[in-house]
Amino acid sequence: MSDITFLLFPVPALFFLGMLLRRSGVIDETALSFLFRFLSTVCLPALTLSIFPYITLQSSMLFIPVVALAVTLTMLAFALIAVKLLRIEEPLRIAFIGGTVAAYTGFSLPFVKPFFGNEGIAIFLLFNASALFAVRVVSRRGVLVSTTSRPLSGKRDPMRHAIAFTLAIGIAMNVADIRFEPVAAVVLHDLGELTIPLVLLASGASVKVPKGNARALFSGALIRMVGGAASGFAVATLCGLQEMERGIAVLCAAAPAGLSLFPAEREADASGTDFSEALASATMLAGLLLLPLLLFVR
């Protein structure tokens, strides 16, 4: 237990440092937006390319996208049932469904690396890319569409597929036994090492005091984290994944809620955005307690 405490101590420390920097004005909205974009377009792709060409690919990794897709669809089913039972109407409906379906899987990475190493990071990256793809498919099918705004698939952005693109390159390099030159490998490694501290700082800086519909917030958090963990464990077990793969799948499936509304929708759906931010904040704070406990679930 003391070893786990030692390994995980930087997680809440950096998270609450991010909260402090936001409250003190060191990190403002513009800086926060830059941090998240830098993470998704530079750090995560660099981490991917610094890991995949050098690991041993396992056949069991083929099941990780299946688990991610199954968890996403299960969360969608849970969310739609909850919306009916709780009688949640627009604009909260889209925020509730989006927050429970679209997980912020990056928040799980600081809990994966210390215990599972590079192979664990590779499994995380596969799950993350697959979950992002599944959410985009769900969004384009019209489920995550508000009556007052366009589908929540984001703006046209040439870098939005950077993670999937570099993942494909990394796997292809591994299969072809191609490695980067030493200088390039060092640069990619150093950029990749920035991922976890920046994820935690940006996550802490994005936290806002949860407020709003308490019943919907509690239900959304319960579905997103407890439902996610349960469905991740069940699907991973059905797929016959081993202890490590199953543990990482559970951590990723139980990740906090992602923001379901993009800046362009905020004016039209102000109350939905407030709920989305509240749900994301509440589940990140809960994740600091829940995800360490899930490390024992194998």
Image (tube, helix red, strand yellow):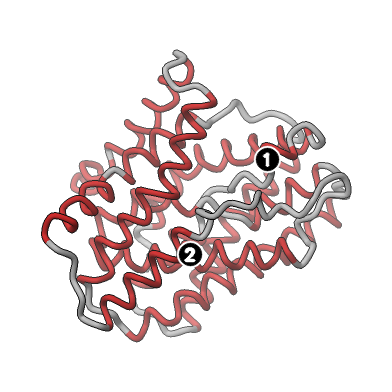
Quarter occupied by residue 60? bottom left
User: Farthest residue toward the top?
Assistant: 24
Q: Position of residue 10 (x, y in %)?
A: 28, 37
Quarter occupied by residue 78? bottom right
Front one among 23 and 74: 23
Circle number at residue 169: none
- Residue drawn at x 33%, y 61% is 48
Front one among 239 and 199: 199
Q: Position of residue 163 (x, y in %)?
A: 44, 60
Q: Position of residue 169 (x, y in %)?
A: 35, 71
For disc 2, the marked residue is 129
Quarter occupied by residue 242? bottom left
Lateral position of residue 38 relative to residue 197, left or right: right
Q: Secondary structure at mark 2?
A: helix
Residue type, numbered disc 2: Ala
- Residue drawn at x 60%, y 60% is 227
- Residue drawn at x 67%, y 55% is 153
